[in-house]
Amino acid sequence: MQVVVPFAAETPKTRLSTVLAPSERHAVARAMLADVLDAIAEADPELDPLILSTAPIELDEYDEFTDRVPRPVVAVDDRPLTEAVNDHLVSTAEPVAIVMADLALATPEAITDVVETPGDVVIAPGRGGGTNALAVRHPEFRVDYHGASYRDHRARAREVGATIETVDSFRLGTDIDEPADLAEVLLHGRGRTAATLREWGFELETSDGRVGVDRSAADSASDF
Ligand SMILES: Nc1nc2c(ncn2[C@@H]2O[C@H](COP(=O)(O)OP(=O)(O)OP(=O)(O)O)[C@@H](O)[C@H]2O)c(=O)[nH]1
Ligand SMILES: C[C@H](OP(=O)(O)O)C(=O)O
């Protein structure tokens, strides 16, 4: 199955701007993308990842921490997310999975659950109403991201007569959007993203009611 990984390359992760400098948001977005690509490759080398990026990206830097052969293809489409993904769905008659690039906790097992669960539309919801991973095997189904897209995708699937399955996954449900989500990476991440945050001096902060992250000012990037 082809696995499309949408990637906002130019101004990624704006909701992390209170804790990460612009250069760090780029770096953490790339680290998360690498973690997702690794999970896909380890789930099944036959899966065919396609990065659907808003701008050209150079993949050479991935060589040092992946043994993926061949490298994923990068397709550049600067249209908004929903439009770009739907155009891709229209252009292929084959089943397609769409896996977001900010799933830093993704594991091969979780990806396998999405691509192997039978159903015309298989959805791994994200916290907050989003759609973090999706498998589409129905020719008329189209995406409608943002807002409560989990609810909207279920409604769209019903409209076209598609069967719907939900994959209940903590690892795929945890997209890294807000500063508090970085605590989940430190707690549960096994890959590049967790290592990057630790290199930057992020630590768990447990003194308040809810676990968060803390970082010493000395470790912040110069463009913060
Ligand atoms: N190709 C493409 N991918 C996008 C676009 N917007 C977001 N993405 C990707 O879609 C996934 C979910 O993105 P969001 O969490 O909604 O947005 P984000 O840009 O990552 O973060 P924020 O700026 O904080 O909203 C991530 O993998 C993004 O890289 C877009 O317009 N085009
Ligand atoms: C793309 C969007 O992501 P969120 O804004 O929920 O992170 C969604 O899942 O619909």
Image (tube, helix red, strand yellow):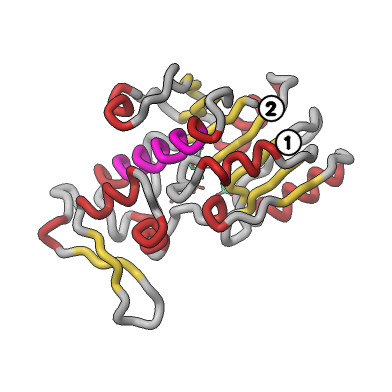
The magenta region covers 26-40
Name the dominant secondary structure of the magenta segment.
Answer: helix
Quadrant housing residue 1: top right
Q: Secondary structure at mark 1?
A: loop
Q: What residue lies at 40% left-to-right and 43% top-to-bottom?
A: 32
Q: What residue lies at 79% left-to-right and 40% top-to-bottom?
A: 119
Q: What residue lies at 41% left-to-right and 40% top-to-bottom?
A: 35
Q: What residue lies at 72% left-to-right and 41% top-to-bottom?
A: 117
Give the image location of residue 111, x and y in percent: 58, 41
CA gap, disc 1 to disc 2? 7 Å
Answer few, some or many: residues within 10 Å of disc 1's Cα (few below 14, many 20 plus, some between 14 and 19): many
- Amino acid type indicated by mark 2: Leu
Q: 203 or 14, which lies in front?
A: 203
Rendered image: mark on residue 89: 2
Label 1 sits on residue? 142
Q: Is residue 143 left or right of residue 37?
A: right
- Tag 2 or tag 1, which sits nearer the N-term? 2
Residue 65 colored in magenta in the image: no
**Furthest-left residue in view?**
218
**Furthest-top residue in view?**
70
Rendered image: mark on residue 108: none
Give the image location of residue 160, x and y in percent: 86, 39
Give the image location of residue 153, x and y in percent: 73, 47
